[in-house]
Image (cartoon, rainbow, N blue to C red):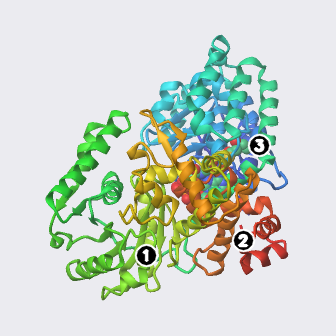
Amino acid sequence: MASPISTEKHGNVLVISSDNPPVNALGQAVREGLKNGIEQAASDNEIEAVVIRCDGRTFFAGADITEFGKAPKGPSLPEVCDAIEASEKPVVAAIHGTALGGGCEIALACHYRVAVPSAKLGLPEVKLGLIPGAAGTQRLPRLVGAEAALPLVVMGNPIPAKKAQAIGLVDELVGEGSLAQDAAEFARSKVGADIPRTSEMTNNQDGVKNPDLFDEFRAKNGRKLRGFDAPNAGIEAVKAAGEMAFEDGVKKERELFAKLMGGTQSAAMRHYFFAERAANKIDDVPADTPLIDVKKVGIIGAGTMGGGIAMNFLSAGIPVTILEMKQDALDRGTGTMRKNYENTAKRGRMTEEQVEGAMGLLTPTLEYDDLADCDLVIEAVYENMDVKKEVFAKLDEVVKDGAILASNTSYLDIDEIATATDRPGYVIGLHFFSPANVMKLLEVVRGEKTRDDVLATAMKLSKKIGKVAAVSGVCPGFIGNRMLSKRQEQANQLILEGANYWEVDEVLLDFGFPMGPFQMGDLAGLDIGWHRDPSKVTTVREALCAKGRFGQKAGKGFYDYDDARQRTPSDEVKQIIADFAEKEGNAQRDISKDEIRERLLYPMVNEGAKILEEGMAQRASDIDVVWINGYGWPLYTGGPMFWADTVGLDTVVAGLEKHGLPVSDYLRAKAQKGERLT
Ligand code: 3H9
């Protein structure tokens, strides 16, 4: 097979090019080719300088993740980096697209880095539960200092070329259209100059002079990093870079890297990386399905949900017409949207111009007719089948043919909604999660008659508005809420059997969720869907509402809240629960944290298995995508399905049986055959 690496002489400069689509991952053949290219440059007397560049959409986007866990073949990435750095002829990295992970490490091993302004550089290994493993944690701080290196290594977010230049990671910005020529010219200008080798630099001494830097960084970012192993290893490695000789630092990095690579967190996060990408693909919809051009979006309902949904499109530069029934509701809704944008601007994440730009794309209206020329209309009205059907019948009447009609329902039957129209093929569910302008997940609900182009367009659009999409079939609650209801059932039951509700929350917090079910209820409002009759009390939740305990907004729900929203368990609620348990004749007992965890999570796995069996999710990993992005399931466990595989399906089945909970045939069969869900 032809090598993905080619070389070409441009006078005294050898240009080494990689052509390994889609992202120039540094697989075996690429590494071999790079090493050969450097050797060729060394042995050719006409050559005085070298440029390393890539064809296609990006510079090397990292090591080839598909090779992880397999026996290493050919030169390792650290070897290739060392060979580049050791070159006696200056080597220049010519960067476009994204120089990520191993790609950034290649660039760090080069003697100079030039980039186009649109390029991004970064070390995202932490997002795969790893740290850089080709001396990135040792070379980067030597080049840019420990303080500037820490966020790159520990948080993993790439930075634009301009910022990279400001911290010293990029030497020169060059024209978007002339990278190859400019890089060669730059390389030529360095012939004869002393060669700057990153491994010999000493800018990392800032961390030695001020060792508090590391603890301060940890303290500042602690909340975001809670539960993850890799970020701490990253901090340790950057610290080591200042304290150790390069070779020793590299050894330290390798030890940390190898430990992470062998651990479950990295396996889980690598699973998630591919899961997110797989979720965007629909098995029976061809990749080349023609898309519907969505140039204008209509939203029905300017409440919290409708407003949040609208913001996604406005932020992506797509004009939105938003409809309400009454002027004051419309004004309130658009006012909230503006306020949200302005708050983002205050935090420095948007400019005033961008706020005005987004709001300028919004057209508020009270007339259905104004939705006529929209390519996509999403309704976000009250969750009631009759109301939804009425809205869809009206839309069918006024909106142009060929437009997509979507419902944001979180559990209603999309197929039934579609019957209100004469175009069921154009009806789809787009279930956003609250706050819709923030939450990453979009559950795309495929109705029985939803057309391929409608579905493919929804998936494409989700990417454009920065969402992570997963497809669900039509079933009550779809993937996410259907599984959530099983967890909630157990949570409600556990507190009637003697578990304290704050312990139930704590078990999930310890597991890695941002909050437990009772905290979540308090945050969302316990009065959602309440019948508003304080004399009618059939559940603990209704009993709380009857006493005005509506949740955080009322200062009291399951918990009492102080002015700083700190929560404490409430004696009143304890009594309410105790009274309820007595009335229902529930014997009280001590319930261990293990039992709580198993009873909350195993039934979710069981429901996930049923969802798979019924074909409501295409693949187990789609369920993981839903739970990680929509419900705070900890990423480092890989999602409920991957987690169940890690625990062992036989253990899950045994646990369900021990607690007297149902086991689906599908799950039992998988466990018996020793198979995995993912
Ligand atoms: C590393 O470097 C370790 C080293 O420090 C040490 C080693 C010793 N490998 O995301 P997209 C595939 S760790 C293999 O849809 P985009 C991806 O699966 C690595 N495959 O495109 C998809 O395949 P498919 C550190 C990869 O334009 C296709 O490429 N680097 C890799 O939205 C297109 O991807 C990273 O973590 C890979 N490294 O985004 C960067 N990357 O079409 C990971 C992508 O079959 N990559 N693929 O579904 C990314 O962040 C994004 O892919 C990127 C492009 C921003 C580059």
Callout 2–callout 1 Cβ contact below 8 Å: no
Dot 3 or dot 2: first in sequence order is 3
Q: Quadrant of residue 238?
A: top right
Q: Residue at x 59, y 27 (%)?
A: 219
**Residue 494: % across, % down:** 65, 59
Dot 1 or dot 3: first in sequence order is 3
Task: Describe residue 639's horizontal placement relative to residue 558 as left or right.
Answer: right
Disc nearest the viewer among 2 and 1? 2
Image vertical order of residue 253 relative to residue 308, above or below? above
Task: Describe residue 337's horizontal placement relative to residue 515 as left or right.
Answer: left
Label 1 secondary element: loop
What is the distance, in whole Å, between disc 2 and disc 1 at their CAs?
A: 26 Å
What is the distance, in whole Å, between disc 1 and disc 3 at their CAs?
A: 43 Å
Label 3 secondary element: helix
Q: Which numbered marker is on residue 661? A: 2
**Residue 545: % across, % down:** 42, 56
Disc nearest the viewer among 1 and 3? 1
Pointer 3 residue: 260
Q: Quadrant of residue 588?
A: bottom right
Circle 1 crowding by C-alpha within 10 Å: few under 14, some 14–19, many from 20: many
Q: Quadrant of the N terminus?
A: bottom right
| Amino acid type at image mark 3 | Leu
Q: Is mark 1 within 8 Å of ligand 1?
A: no
| Amino acid type at image mark 1 | Leu
Q: Which numbered marker is on residue 232? A: none
Res 658 visible:
yes
Q: Residue at x 16, y 55 (%)?
A: 328
Pointer 1 residue: 412
What is the distance, in whole Å, between disc 3 and disc 2 at their CAs?
A: 36 Å
Image vertical order of residue 281 relative to residue 631, above or below? below
Q: What number of labels is visible?
A: 3
